[in-house]
């Protein structure tokens, strides 16, 4: 794309100290900027000490060298308060806070170098790039910088299916990280409450019973359920009624109506069922205020006209029934 502004992102690592530690290499960041043309570099760093140097000193050195060598038009740095540089969850959250605030639009291309930083930082870059959470419309390019001490240097594009040993070794770690980053949803039966990521979802009693129904299907390994036609099954209605009795002492109009329909073997319309699902999903989305998280825990609806499948995408270990 002509006149595209190219921005490099990178954590600052010990290797970037370069001449400060009498290293023959100037470090991965400067090498990356020499290997290809970028307009701007954003340095991400954590304020702690390595050997005799602090990262503050390394960042000051880097900015000075980058400007001196005129490698980019603009260099900036962002301090991340990371207490544990091996904690994927902490790193990923802090990294997302930074990247969420980056301007993403036509004419701007972002590349992240995963070479500098801890293995956990590398894994978080890969997760961010491969998951699409950086941006659905504007992807994040990932590179690994080949050290010039071991042959001709290059910025090597990173993909999880490449033969790069260091990247392949991270593949299982990234997959585990994706699961670790998903919080737990607690379905509290005695209180009739759904709590996701410590947030109370304000479901009505009937909506809570619906959610418990689909959560138990996931936990029991039953998967999604198919609903078709103009009504739902009597078995479903009876299950919801029993859940309502178990969690809510008071007898509300929904349970009265549902009990009457069960006794008379009347059908609950699919429109009423879908309406309750939609209302529950809307409350989950609004409370969590995180589309990725909401999509994981909402009651999903898939399928074409006439028959749809309903279920929850969250893995069974992330759904806890508290009796």
Image (cartoon, rainbow, N blue to C red):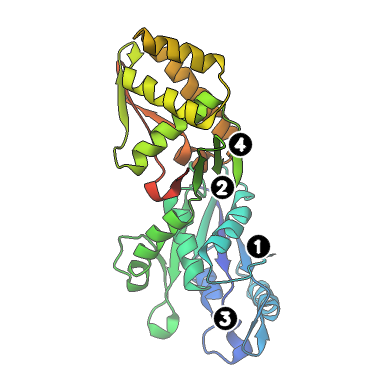
Per the rendering, the mark at residue 64 is none
User: In this rendering, which labeled residue sits more in front, label 3 or label 1?
Assistant: 3
Q: CA distance from mark 1 to mark 4?
A: 42 Å
Q: Position of residue 71 (x, y in %)?
A: 60, 69
Disc 2 marks which residue? Answer: 197
Q: Residue at x 44, y 79 (%)?
A: 147
Q: CA distance from mark 2 to mark 4?
A: 10 Å
Would you identify the image quadrant in which residue 63 lies? bottom right
User: 234 or 175: nearer the eye?
Assistant: 234
Q: Secondary structure at mark 3?
A: helix
Looking at the image, which residue is at 48% across and 51% down?
182
**As rendered, which of 65 and 242 lies closer to the eye?**
242
> What residue would you read off at disc 3?
14
Q: Taking the image as drawn, is residue 106 in sight?
A: no
How many C-alpha atoms fall within 10 Å of the one at disc 2: few (<14), some, or many (≥20)?
few
- Position of residue 305 measured from the top left corner of the image (x, y, whole percent): 31, 17
Marks 2 and 1 sit apart, C-alpha to C-alpha, by: 42 Å
Which residue: 35% across, 13% down?
231
Circle 3 or circle 2, nearest the eye = 2
Q: Of discs 2 and 1, which sits in the foreground?
A: 2
Query: Which one is in front, 45 or 233?
Result: 233
Residue 322 position, x and y percent, is 48, 44
């Amino acid at each position: 794309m002509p006149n595209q502004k190219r921005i490099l992102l990178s954590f600052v690592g010990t290797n970037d100290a370069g001449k400060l530690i009498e290293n023959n290499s100037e470090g991965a960041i400067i090498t990356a900027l020499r290997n290809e043309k970028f307009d701007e570099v954003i340095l991400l760093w954590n304020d702690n000490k390595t050997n005799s140097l602090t990262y503050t000193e390394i960042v000051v050195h880097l900015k000075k060298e980058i400007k001196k060598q005129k490698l980019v038009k603009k260099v900036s740095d962002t301090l991340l308060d990371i207490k544990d540089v091996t904690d994927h969850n902490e790193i990923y959250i802090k990294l997302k806070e930074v990247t969420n605030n980056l301007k993403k639009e036509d004419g701007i291309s972002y590349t992240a170098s995963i070479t500098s930083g801890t293995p956990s930082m590398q894994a978080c870059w890969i997760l961010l790039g491969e998951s699409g959470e950086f941006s659905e419309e504007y992807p994040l390019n990932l590179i690994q910088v080949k050290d010039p001490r071991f042959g001709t240097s290059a910025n090597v594009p990173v993909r999880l299916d490449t033969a790069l040993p260091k990247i392949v070794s991270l593949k299982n770690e990234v997959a585990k990280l994706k699961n670790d980053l998903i919080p737990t949803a607690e379905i509290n039966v005695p209180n009739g409450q759904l709590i996701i990521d410590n947030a109370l979802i304000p479901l009505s009693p009937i909506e809570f019973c619906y959610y418990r129904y689909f959560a138990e299907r996931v936990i029991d390994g039953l998967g999604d359920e198919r609903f078709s036609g103009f009504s739902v099954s009597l078995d479903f209605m009876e299950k919801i009624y029993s859940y309502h009795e178990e969690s809510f002492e008071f007898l509300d109009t929904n349970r009265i109506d549902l009990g009457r329909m069960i006794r008379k073997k009347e059908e609950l319309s699919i429109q009423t069922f879908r309406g309750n699902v939609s209302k529950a999903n809307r409350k989950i989305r609004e409370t969590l205020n995180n589309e990725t998280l909401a999509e994981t825990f909402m009651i999903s609806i898939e399928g074409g006209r006439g028959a749809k499948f309903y279920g929850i995408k969250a893995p069974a270990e992330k759904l806890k029934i508290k009796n």
